Amino acid sequence: MISVSTIVLLWLSVSLAVMGPIVDDSSNSDGPQVTTVANDASSGKWLTSFDEAKKTSIERNVPLILHFEAVWCGACRQMDAAVLNHQDVAKHLGSSVIGVRIDADRDPELIAKYAISSLPTEVVIGSDGLELARYTGSATLAEYTARLDKSGIRSGTDPNTNPILGLDDSLRRCLLVMRDGKVVGLGGFCPVAMMRDKKWLKGSEEFVGSYDGVDYFFQTAEEREFFFACPKEFVPGLHGCDPVEFQRGRRAETGAIELGAFYKGRVFFFTSPSNRRLFTNNPAWYAEGVSTDRIQNLEQFPFLKSMDLN
């Protein structure tokens, strides 16, 4: 087992916001070129892109195995030759688990994020982004296939469960509305008053500004100017679409005003309390690396096609 130098631990702090029911939650890689990158994870091969592997894990609701290695690591090379490419391992990949091989020298951010201190190390992540298991050191083929059998049955939420069903009728899912053929953000509430003053105040049709193809209403011309000085400080993540539904369900669904959470100073909204809980448990998993790939209803939210999602 060989130590990896210069490990930087990342941390995530979670705190409560003062704005009503909103919760304040503050806190890509290419792996080693040792196997063929599988665009279809069902092909039974290791992936080398963390982003692609993460997306596939979420979509298929199966665990993600992060295999950290390096070309100079003797134990890693031994596993590469005798274990990782064996057919008994390949049959699990893309079906019961998604596997990605990560080069420690090329991905220092992931090394730091998952606090990897020795190689080889494997981290098993659920489709909700939470760590399920961790293994250090090399393993025999029999030990490794037993590990895969164990990891493969530890999947997350039933993918057939629709978190939007049963949404309380009292919740106001009106963050994005159509008015005169245009998309209006925050249901006409002023984004500056929401973020700066922690108040839900209606804007005026006299003071309107467009950002990413979405119109926002303000109470005064000064607020509008303040907004455009740094719009990302005020615009909700995905303009109010639920990031958990976006990642797990591959659909754009507008969140409810009463169901918000903060991450890195930005507010996100959700379609259900369960989605908000998933987000606050691991906000980086849902807020970062967002992609419109295979989103089923993009035509309903055309601004998502061209905006910067992160």
Image (tube, rainbow, N blue to C red):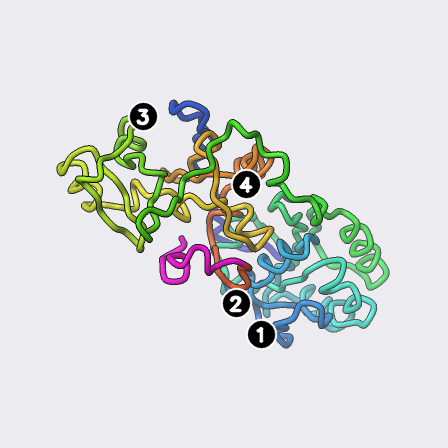
Q: Which residues are magenta?
A: 297-310
Q: Pointer 2: what residue?
A: 30
Q: Nearer the viewer, residue 81 or 222?
A: 222
Circle nearer the viewer, 2 or 3: 3
Rate crowding at label 4 as few (under 14), some (14 to 19) or many (20 or more) other CA atoms within 10 Å: some
User: Residue 22 is drawn in which quadrant?
Assistant: top left
Residue type, numbered disc 1: Gln
Whether residue 291 is visible here, answered yes or no, is: yes
Residue 282 image label: 4
Quarter holding the N terminus? bottom right
The magenta stretch spans residue 300: yes
How many numbered tags mark residues here? 4
The residue beneath circle 1 is: 33
Q: Judge whether residue 1 can be spotted in this image.
A: no
Does residue 285 appear to the left or right of 185 in the view shown? right
How far apart, in angstroms, are the residues tagged by discs 1 and 2? 8 Å
Q: Position of residue 121 (x, y in %)?
A: 65, 55
Q: CA distance from mark 3 to mark 4?
A: 26 Å
Residue at the image position 69 percent from the left and 47 percent from the top: 134
Q: Is residue 87 above or below residue 249?
A: below
Residue flagged by tag 2: what amino acid is it? Asp
Of the numbered discs 2 and 4, the one sitting upstream in the chain is 2
Q: State the residue position of label 3.
A: 199
Mark 3 and mark 1: span between their CA atoms?
51 Å
